[in-house]
Amino acid sequence: MKKDHQTAKVFAAGLAGLGVFFSAFAFGEDRPSLKSIVDTLKAQKIEHYVFSNSQDNQLLVVPKFGARILAVSVGGENLFWSSPSVLEGQGGFRTWIAPEGGDKGIIFKPDWKGNRDFSMLDPGNYKVVNLEGNEEIVLSTAIKTASNDGKTHYDLTLTRDIRLGEDPLKDDPDFRELHYQYLGIEFVHSLKNHAQKPLEQIIGLWGLINVPPKGTMIIPVTGVAREAWRATYYEPIPGEFVKANADSFSFYIHGSQRYKAGVRPESAAGVICYLAESRGGEYSLVSMSFPVKPEGRYPDRPMDEQETNGDAVQLYSHLKPGNLAFGELECQSWGLDLPAGGEAAFPVKIDMYKAPLEVLKKIGARVVCAGFAQAHIF
């Protein structure tokens, strides 16, 4: 992919004080487009950065909102779920820290009933530490807090490094004649430990993409067995919302019920993707790939299974009415080794495509799993 050399701009001009929460939505009237979100940010003079690739597909980064990639535009459509109330700063692609709950968690309260104040993480206080034109942005924030059990004090710097990525199929002769829209993101998040004591596999990095229902989450596995995944985080997944494929599982992100499933590290293939119907009879594919350590100790676990190993891949269906419902693609690092003064990173590649379904089936068989074309689609 050729990269544009247009300079990424900070859009801070506009009509201040209007309190604009909604603009024209890109898909019916339930999904804000990247352009409508930018219009709102301009009106409120909120710092933001837009990056464009050679097809003029775009991603939007907002430091104030957890340095999230708050929205994307692929073929003119936002493939992420972004909150219709733009100034809430919710949705898109964010960084979380595992575990959420338990002794070493910083999100859930010790009794798992409600949340702690985790504003130091989200939205944080991100500052831009490096900007390379239309190619890359690096942002960081400080996190100082204590674990639920009070025995571990976290003094961390969290950094998000975001750059435009190249299509892995761009030089493949089998795809040269196919027509599709593409946007890629090369992403690395990292933690630096400023405390005097080491953090030994206690916490991990966690990447989450919000997507709009309804669609199919496809998770490749190294062996198709029911033991590869569990769904004991929240309410059970309805049996009709899960299908086993030749080399993957399909899960229905419906928006009508809350459920979460996790794939064990020894079964995870390092990919999770979301396939959904798009505008004009086309479909969209959002794929996230990442390293997996099968023997690693993963820190996030269900409330009643704290003595087990955590999951490397998770999916989530969030129940809220109407356009407030969303799904999540989630990938986690193993517990990181962070000596005093030490730093550890976890990379994620995001590939997004928009095309007719038959084209995406061929693409998915190359970038997701060999049996993608035969996987069950809800």
Image (cartoon, rainbow, N blue to C red):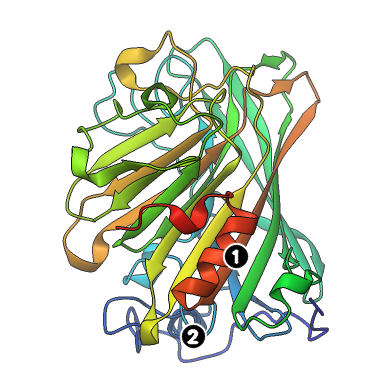
Residue 62 seen in the figure: no
235 vs 200: above or below? below
Query: For mark 1, what is the residue?
Result: 363
Horizontal arrangement in the rendering, residue 292 relative to residue 25 (left or right): right
Determine the residue positioned at 62% across, 32% down.
333
Residue 185, image x, y percentages: 67, 62
151 vs 353: above or below? above
Q: Quadrant of the C terminus?
A: bottom left
Mark 2 belongs to which amino acid? Lys
Q: Quadrant of the N terminus?
A: bottom right
Residue 214 seen in the figure: yes
Q: Viewer-proximal residue, 269 or 18?
A: 269
Lower sequence index among marks 2 and 1: 2
Determine the residue positioned at 35% across, 87% down.
23
Q: Viewer-proximal residue, 118 or 99?
A: 99
Residue 369, image x, y percentages: 58, 49
